[in-house]
Image (tube, rainbow, N blue to C red):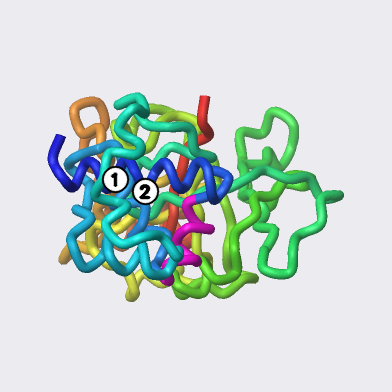
Amino acid sequence: MDIYEIRRQNLRHLVSTRFNGRIASLADAIERAPSYVSRCLTGKPEHRKRIGEALARDVEDKLGIQRLWLDSGHATQLPVDEPPVAAQAAHPEMADFSIWDDESPAADDEVLVPFLHEVELAAGSGRFAIEETEGSTLRFGKRSLRKNGVKFSDAKCVSVRGNSMLPVLRDGAIVGVDVGKNSFGDIIDGDLYAINHNGQLRIKQVYRTALGLRLRSFNRDEHPDEDYSFDEVQDQGIAIIGHVFWWGMFAK
């Protein structure tokens, strides 16, 4: 086991034992963005950021831990498939979260973020609109939203359905959406966006093309690219709901 893996396991051990499994709490304590810490802790090597010398020493200083503690084998007895945390990191934007109903008050440093879902406009009509879900919310730390440049009132959540975004987003994954970033002109090619497709709620990579838009799935073997001209975008009721700034998955 190399030094980077030892540091990663030790840091995950701290998340589990000292921060109650909350990655965002550790991020706040060491003054780093939750997305950055998630990259350090993720179990996926292709997404992982190494915990270098400077970061390791800075973490120890900020947490009041003895120098070089992260470099020793304190947590190497932990299982290789990761110690328990509130949510399993799947991507750099991943952070911990909890579902609460409307009767659960938010702490002073938290925001209760509502869910969006598809609602049939009339029974059997086949026409849908996208509205906020009543009764369930997801709580985010205010500091985490600020670091992602998201206004509290612009934060919404969406449940992912289907296999089109595998292997990154599984069926049932949750994404955080900044509905303040919903202009076609502001699209960042390749970023994830929540889309209203004639009442259907979709999560896709979006690209601007010379003639219109391209919607791309991660699972391109089963879900090929979809190209739409500007006229088709209008005719098919395609609209950007917002930019995806976070995603996660409940621990099973």
Residue range of the region highlighted in magenta in the rendering: 23-31
- Rendered position, 125 above or below 95: above
Q: Is 27 situated left or right of 133 in this image?
A: left
Residue occupying the point 86% across, 49% down: 103
Label 2 CA crowd tier, 10 Å (few <14, some 14–19, many 20+): many
Whole-percent x, y for residue 64 in the image: 45, 65
Whole-percent x, y for residue 224 in the image: 21, 35
Please name whichever residue, 225 or 164, is drawn nearer the observer in this view of the structure. Answer: 164
Quick check: is 25 in the magenta stretch? Answer: yes
Whole-percent x, y for residue 102 in the image: 82, 50
Quick check: is 196 in the magenta stretch? Answer: no
Q: Which residue is mark 1?
A: 8
Please name whichever residue, 185 or 132, is drawn nearer the observer in this view of the structure. Answer: 132
Disc sitting over residue 11 in the figure: 2
Amino acid type for the residue under numbered disc 2: Leu
Residue occupying the point 67% across, 68% down: 109
In the structure shown, which secondary structural element does the residue marked by tag 2 occupy? helix
Residue occupying the point 43% across, 71% down: 31
The answer, for residue 229, to whether it is visible in the render is no
